[in-house]
Amino acid sequence: MKGRSLVALLWLVIADSAAGAEFMVEVKVDVQRGCVLVHQPRDAGAQAVGVLDFGTTARLDDPAGPLTSQLLSQRPPRLECNPDTSYQIAVDAGQHGGVGEVRYLASNQPASRPIPYRLYQDPAWRVPLPVGEVQHARVPSSGSAALPLYARIDRLAEVPAVGRYSDLLKVTVTW
């Protein structure tokens, strides 16, 4: 009887133990370079992101210096990418044309002459943005690159006709 009890007990232990297997699963991701323009609607086509506003003035020959402006926007555009991603930025000639570093503000008044202005990447006016010329840069280690725009109207000897002068620029960012 002892033998039968031992065999029955052994059979219960074997029957009670779970059979199992182990296996390995690889988990991976390939991170590729990419960017997103932050604070932009996801709609197709160009979107308005702000205004370069020179304000109000009667003359453009102020001895204090040129009229200046910077991109005014509640959320200035910036590029978020993998660190060290290269990107390019170019600004077209605007609605009223331009050559080299000069673009033009125009009025809807027929007798008015266009007002020349220049664009820059920095507030010190050292890095111009010539018409259609591609500027190359790299995203810093933070992964975020601001896309500032600054504008300047140099002193003009002539007094412009009264009116609102404007231009519309297309900025192209590629990566």
Image: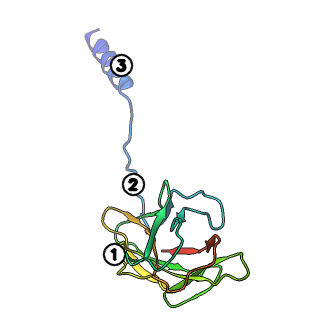
Q: Nearer the viewer, mark 1 or mark 2?
A: 1
Q: Which mark is residue 124?
A: 1
> Which class describes the residues within 10 Å of circle 2: few (<14), some (14-19), or many (20+)?
few
Closest to the observer, 118 or 11 = 118
- Using the rendered image of the protein, determine whether residue 20 is visible from the camera's viewpoint: yes
Figure quadrant of residue 147: bottom left
Which mark is first along the chain, 1 or 3? Answer: 3
Q: Which residue is mark 2?
A: 26
Figure quadrant of residue 169: bottom right
Which mark is first along the chain, 3 or 2? Answer: 3
Closest to the observer, 60 or 20 = 60
Q: In the rendered view of the protein, which quadrant contains the N terminus?
A: top left
The three-letter amino acid code for the residue at tag 2 is Glu
The number of numbered discs placed on residues in the rendered structure image is 3
> Which class describes the residues within 10 Å of circle 1: few (<14), some (14-19), or many (20+)?
few
Helix, strand or loop at disc 2?
loop
Residue depicted at x 37% and y 22%: 16
Q: Which mark is residue 12?
A: 3
- Could you tell me if the residues under marks 1 and 2 are in contact, i.e. CB atoms within 8 Å? no
**Residue 75: image location, x then y, percent:** 48, 55
**Residue 135: image location, x then y, percent:** 44, 82
CA gap between label 2 and label 3 equals: 37 Å
CA gap between label 3 and label 1 equals: 86 Å
Residue depicted at x 40% and y 51%: 25
Left or right side of 22 for 162: right
